[in-house]
Image (cartoon, helix red, strand yellow):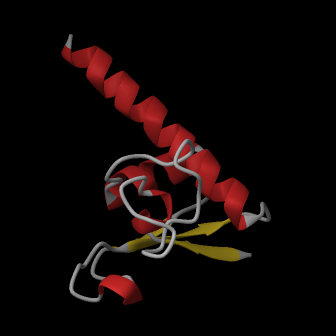
Amino acid sequence: MSTMIWPIYIDRNKSRGEGRKVSLDNGVAGPKLKEVYQAAKNLKFNPEMEEDASYPGEWYNHSGRVFVETPIPKKNILIAISEEIKVLRNRKQNKKR
């Protein structure tokens, strides 16, 4: 089953009304499309990226979206991707040191 993931779904800087679908604890600040794609790839969700797509609530912002192939419920996918982005950011930050 294909599931659509917009970066705004896991953005802790956005409110639920603006489109966030996970709790603040499970969200990440300002997730980038490439981070969402890389996290989904690391989790073996077979992602496909659409870079020029705009989230309907922010039609003026071409944030892009990622489609993933997995039978896991959407909420669990979002939390897993968010947690993987946190791991990726930690690795990147530790490399800088």
Residue placed farthest to the top in the image?
97
Q: Return the residue nearer the eye: 2 or 6.
A: 6
| Residue 76, picture quadrant | bottom right
The residue at 31%/56% (across/down) is 32
Q: Is residue 91 visible?
A: yes
Q: Position of residue 25 (x, y in %)?
A: 55, 41
The residue at 38%/25% (across/down) is 90
Q: Does 40 sit above or below residue 57?
A: above
Which image quadrant: the N terminus? bottom right
Q: Is residue 21 left or right of residue 18?
A: right
Q: Return the residue nearer the eye: 91 or 9.
A: 9
Q: Is residue 7 left or right of residue 58?
A: right
Q: Is residue 54 visible?
A: no
Q: Return the residue nearer the eye: 20 or 34.
A: 20
The residue at 45%/41% (across/down) is 85
Q: Is residue 74 left or right of residue 14?
A: right
Q: Position of residue 40 (x, y in %)?
A: 54, 53
The residue at 20%/17% (across/down) is 96
Q: Return the residue nearer the eye: 32 or 1.
A: 32
Q: Position of residue 20 (x, y in %)?
A: 50, 66
Which image quadrant: the C terminus? top left
Q: Does 9 sit above or below residue 96?
A: below
| Residue 56, picture quadrant | bottom left
Q: Report the label total.
A: 0
Q: Position of residue 41 (x, y in %)?
A: 52, 50
